[in-house]
Amino acid sequence: MARGPLPDQLYGTVRVNDAVIEIIEVLEEQPWGARSCPPHTHAWFECNYIYEGSMKTGFGGPLMNVGPGEFFLVPAGAEHRHEYEPQSPHRGVCMRWTVAPADTSGGSEAGSVYAALEGLRQWQLGCYADRYGLGERILRLFEEAREADSLASVQLTFVQILLAIAAVRHPEGRITPAAVDQSDTAFLRKIEVYLNDERAEKMNVRRLADALHVSYNHLARKYKRLTGKTIVGRLTEIRLSRALDLLRRTDASIGAIAEVSGFGAAHYFSRVFKDAYGVSPKTYRQALPADAKAERGTGVASGSDHSAR
């Protein structure tokens, strides 16, 4: 589907009625050797349309296969990840843009371009079969860019594509997430049991790999592929959850909570806690409602059925 690059002059700001659209990029995606793109967010909207081959994408859950004639939209700020299929490299188009209100007064919501495009923040995350003619519109954009005398008309075509997407209030043809193999489900369950059991001890991923009869590298790669997270990252989530419970329900010292939650040193626990929640454990506890403070137990064991080991 080679169409060639769009002219750089296309990119930039275009105003349509009450909206200012920044066209960041419209690029033809080609196989480039990467096997995955880890979970990430960005400040712009993005729409990916697949013409050939396939890829996988996910929004915090199982990955979905995306093939020819299918697309997905990523609202600004939505976390997502991708995996690419070496045996079926995809070719498609990726469009990126932002939208802001124009400096207008006395405007009406009726027919508002800004309201329509800003409404894409509420898009139902997922991958969809193209039942709306988006693929043909995108190809026409490339044709116009190659033949049109005025770049303004090409920019308008781009905006019309965005409005066509925004007009799809309730998208149909949602693609079902790729089924997780039962053996993978069992694999994840074993890891979850191990991590919950190990939270009060120093984590040793290699010992976990030995217990599952797999190599360390295989374990790390497979867990990341299935969940989008690292094993250490998941363990940290479990330990933080345990620590939050103890901070709320006991008057145990920060050092004692750090130890029983599996963090060890209090200063390390405080740093991880603040990175996750924006405040220190001490500040978090002080900000708890008075009734929660009154119901606290007197030690670590009283806040949970689990005691320190």
Image (cartoon, rainbow, N blue to C red):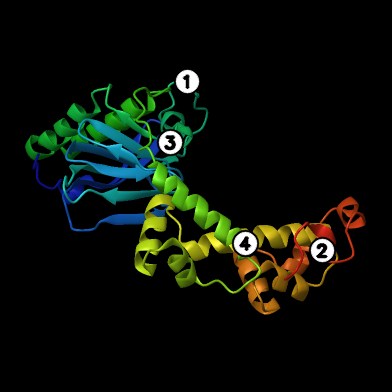
In this image, 77 relative to 268: left or right?
left
First along the sequence among labels 2 and 3:
3
Do residues under tags 1 and 4 come within 8 Å of each other at their CB atoms?
Answer: no
First along the sequence among labels 2 and 1:
1
Q: Amino acid type of disc 1?
A: Ala
In the rendered image, the vertical position of residue 229 relative to residue 260, given as above or below: above
Q: Quadrant of residue 230?
A: bottom left
Q: Which marked residue is nearer to the observer: mark 2 or mark 3?
A: 2
| Closer to us: 36 or 196 | 196
What is the distance, in whole Å, between disc 4 and disc 2 at their CAs?
16 Å
Query: Is residue 171 in sight in this rendering?
Result: yes
**Mark 2: few, some, or many residues within 10 Å (few <14, many ≥20)?**
some
The residue labelled by disc 3 is 125
Residue 110: mark: 1
Measured as percent of width and height from the top left, residue 84 is found at 25, 50
Q: Amino acid type of disc 3?
A: Leu
Residue 197: mark: 4
Measured as percent of width and height from the top left, residue 19 is found at 40, 35
First along the sequence among labels 1 and 4:
1
Q: Which marked residue is nearer to the observer: mark 1 or mark 4?
A: 4
The residue labelled by disc 2 is 301
